[in-house]
């Protein structure tokens, strides 16, 4: 069976079919997510925290992401797989091209995800011109947690909101084929989703985005410490892991997740 590709995902936005995305890091979950109707798996650098027990995503390496991406690819046949580019693995264009190429050639990813706004537009252009599909990540950027002073909602002030819209436009113009918006006010996420043509996936960004993503361990109630307000324990609702994943997919597709209480 061939994998879902960007043409399918673009069509989902055009036809207003919500995109269900979750993180996964191994073959068993990759298989289950695919069977449950998840469209896109993100091998996120959140693995640093939920798998490795690190305090942030910063220690994650390109080799770590390749290892987990390979496992996810082995466990699935049809789901679209995105691999995160770790902290400082794209600090210049040459480094970005060589690391992204490894995530695709060695890991098997179909797309790479980079955190940052217009400042990384040239890197995005260099990658996409070489045939490497890019998902851009805006809003709360976990790799910049020390600069941001914590995991906080972004884009609340007018200037920051305008900058975020300008960033989204610049990244689309540079060739980005998808945008993740993390932890921003729902009206701002709606505006970005309506402004750009590429699919916009939200996490803590309200339910007007083209799709949703959550960290798998958060939506299964396994968060160490406080679960983010925008997440939800689907396992508590359903009592079984396969049912929890199916409910997440149903709730994303029907627009029932996230609720007003799960957005900013
Ligand atoms: O690493 C990750 O899991 C992510 C999601 C939070 C979008 O980037």
Image (cartoon, helix red, strand yellow):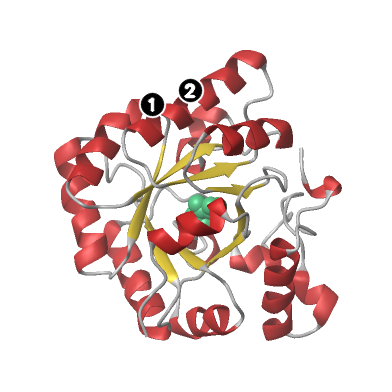
Marking on residue 166:
2
The residue drawn where x is 73% and y is 83% is 243
> In which quadrant will I find the N terminus?
bottom left
Residues under numbered marks 2 and 1 in contact, where contact means CB atoms less than 8 Å apart? yes
Q: Does the residue labelled 1 lie within 8 Å of ligand 1?
A: no
Q: Nearer the viewer, mark 2 or mark 1?
A: 2
* Quarter of the figure with residue 248: bottom right
Which residue, as the protein is rendered here, is positioned at the far top? 159
Res. 98 in view? yes
Badge 1 local density, few (<14 within 10 Å), some, or many (20+)?
some
The residue drawn where x is 28% and y is 70% is 108
Res. 43 in view? no
- Residue nearer the viewer, 69 or 208: 208
Q: Is 73 situated left or right of 214 in this image?
A: left
From the top left corner, tell me how far across and down residue 247 is, in percent.
74, 74
**Residue at disc 2, secondary structure:** helix
- Residue nearer the viewer, 86 or 149: 86
Q: Is 33 situated left or right of 92 in this image?
A: right
Answer with mark 2 or mark 1, whichever residue precedes in sequence. 1
The residue drawn where x is 37% and y is 42% is 176
The residue drawn where x is 44% and y is 83% is 27
From the top left corner, tell me how far across and down residue 160 is, in percent.
58, 19
Q: Is 130 situated left or right of 227 in this image?
A: left
Measured in 3D between alpha carbons, the distance from the residue under mark 2 to the one under mark 1, in whole angstroms, is 8 Å
Residue annotated with mark 1: 118
- In this rendering, the answer to whether 97 lies above or below 33 is above
Badge 2 local density, few (<14 within 10 Å), some, or many (20+)?
some
Marking on residue 220:
none
From the top left corner, tell me how far across and down residue 85 is, in percent.
34, 51
Which residue, as the protein is rendered here, is positioned at the far front? 15
Number of numbered tags placed on the structure image: 2
- In this rendering, the answer to whether 168 lies above or below 25 is above
């Amino acid at each position: 069976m061939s994998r879902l590709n960007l043409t399918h995902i673009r069509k989902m936005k055009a036809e207003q079919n919500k995109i269900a995305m979750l993180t996964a890091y191994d073959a068993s979950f990759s298989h289950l997510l695919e069977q449950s109707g998840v469209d896109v798996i993100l091998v996120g650098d959140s693995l640093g925290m939920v798998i490795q027990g690190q305090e942030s995503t910063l220690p994650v390496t390109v080799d770590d992401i390749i290892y987990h991406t390979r496992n996810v690819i082995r466990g699935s046949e049809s789901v679209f797989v995105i691999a995160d580019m770790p902290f400082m693995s794209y600090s210049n264009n040459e480094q970005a091209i060589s690391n992204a190429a490894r995530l695709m050639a060695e890991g098997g990813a179909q797309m790479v995800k980079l955190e940052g706004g217009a400042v990384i537009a040239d890197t995005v252009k260099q990658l996409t011109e070489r045939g490497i599909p890019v998902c851009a990540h805006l809003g709360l950027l976990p790799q910049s947690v020390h600069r941001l002073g914590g995991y906080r909602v972004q884009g609340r002030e007018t200037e920051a909101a305008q900058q975020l819209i300008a960033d989204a436009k610049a990244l689309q113009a540079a060739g980005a084929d998808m945008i993740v918006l993390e932890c921003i006010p729902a009206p701002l996420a709606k505006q970005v989703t309506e402004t750009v043509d590429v699919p916009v996936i939200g996490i803590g960004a309200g339910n007007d985005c083209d799709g949703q993503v959550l960290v798998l361990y958060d939506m299964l109630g396994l968060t160490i410490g406080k679960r983010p307000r925008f997440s939800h324990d689907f396992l508590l609702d359903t009592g079984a892991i396969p049912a929890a994943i199916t409910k997440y997919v149903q709730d994303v597709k029907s627009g029932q997740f996230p609720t007003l209480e799960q957005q900013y």
